[in-house]
Each structure stands twice: as C-alpha cells, then as structure tokens.
C-alpha cells in the first residue's frame, strides 16, 4: 500500500480571535494548493481515498485535492488532528480496513505529526530529521498489515516549490 502524507496548505495565522480548528486556508494557500494538485494530476497520480483531519484548513486542502480529480472519496478521521496518535490510527483506522496491496491512500493533516509519523513508519522512532512544508507530501510504501513499525520505504519527498 502507498501512503501519501500531505500537510495542509498555507492557513490563517493563529490569533486570539480564531480557534485553531477554524483556521482556513489563505488566498495564497488555496492558490498554491490548487496548482500543486493540478501538477500531481499531470504526473498521473490518483488516490483511492483521501482521509483528512476535521480541522478546516486540512479539510479544505482535501477538498482541493478531490476537486482536481485526485480522488472522489474523502473521509474524516479524528486521529489526524494535531493531538492524534499514530498507534491509535493504525490500530483503529488502518488495520481493520485491510486495504489491497496496490491501494493509494492520501492522509491530510498537520505538523509535526505527519513528519513524526513518517519517521515512525520508516525507522520505528522519531528522529526529528524530516520536515514537511505546507502543501508538501511524503510518499511511503507500507509493508503488509501487522508488520512492525519501521519497516516502510519512502519513495517520495517533495517540497511544494518543486511542484509549482
């Protein structure tokens, strides 16, 4: 299975007037995410499913990916919010679905979670070496369900500027 970890696009800055979960993409964030989505389509990428955090900025990013034609299916998972836990996500969301080996799953979420999750999937521990930029993507080939964490293979790490 191919897992694509995608960070949400550029969003409103944190302020006392806006709750974190309500921060939306800026105009620039929407435009860049749309361009990146179109570039991914042009590269022939397609996801079987996009799973997103319920926070507004992640949900909007997932909707832009879907509107570009990268997937017609979007689902939300509370495990992808900033306080999410990879072990819980794998055990309660990923494993029970028993995906086919050729499945392409996109996950739209937040930092530092996505970089940390990638490191756990790749090396079995957080090494604080990966940084996922806004609207950036990490592609990871997952081994068979039930394999220990740290047995995956990274095949894609792209900064957004290279897709614009």
Image (cartoon, helix red, strand yellow):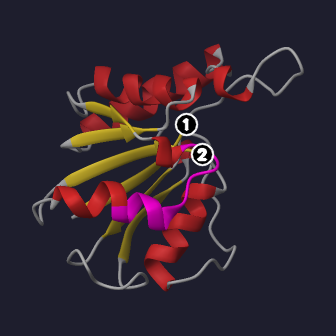
User: Relative to residue 146, is residue 101 drawn left or right?
Assistant: left
Residue 89 drawn in magenta: yes
The numbered mark at residue 16 is: none
Residue 83 drawn in magenta: yes
Q: Give the image location of residue 70, x and y in percent.
A: 25, 34
Q: Is residue 26 above or below residue 2?
A: above
Q: Give the image location of residue 100, x and y in percent.
A: 10, 61
The image quadrant where one finds the N terminus is bottom left
User: Label 1 near label 2: C-beta < 8 Å?
Assistant: yes
Residue that mark 1 sits on: 8
Rendered image quadrant of residue 126 = bottom right
Residue that mark 2 sits on: 110
Residue positioned 12% across, 61% down in the render: 102
Towards the viewer: 66 or 94: 94
Residue positioned 41% across, 30% down in the render: 62
Q: Say whether residue 16 is visible.
A: yes
Towards the viewer: 49 or 77: 77
User: Relative to residue 102, is residue 119 drawn left or right?
Assistant: right
Residue positioned 35% across, 78% down in the render: 153
């Amino acid at each position: 299975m191919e897992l694509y970890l995608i960070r949400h696009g550029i969003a409103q800055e944190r302020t006392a007037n806006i709750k974190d979960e309500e921060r939306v993409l800026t105009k620039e964030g929407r435009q860049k995410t749309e361009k990146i989505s179109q570039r991914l389509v042009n590269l022939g990428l397609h996801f079987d499913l996009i799973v997103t955090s319920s926070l507004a900025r992640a949900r909007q990013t997932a909707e832009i990916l879907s509107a570009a034609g990268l997937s017609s299916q979007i689902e939300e998972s509370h495990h992808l919010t900033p306080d999410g836990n990879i072990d819980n996500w794998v055990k309660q969301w990923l494993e029970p679905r028993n995906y086919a080996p050729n499945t392409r799953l996109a996950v739209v979420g937040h930092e530092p979670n996505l970089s940390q999750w990638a490191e756990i999937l790749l090396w079995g521990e957080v090494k604080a070496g990966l940084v996922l930029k806004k609207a950036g993507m990490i592609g990871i080939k997952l081994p068979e369900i039930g394999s220990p964490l740290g047995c995956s293979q990274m095949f894609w790490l792209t900064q957004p500027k290279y897709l614009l």
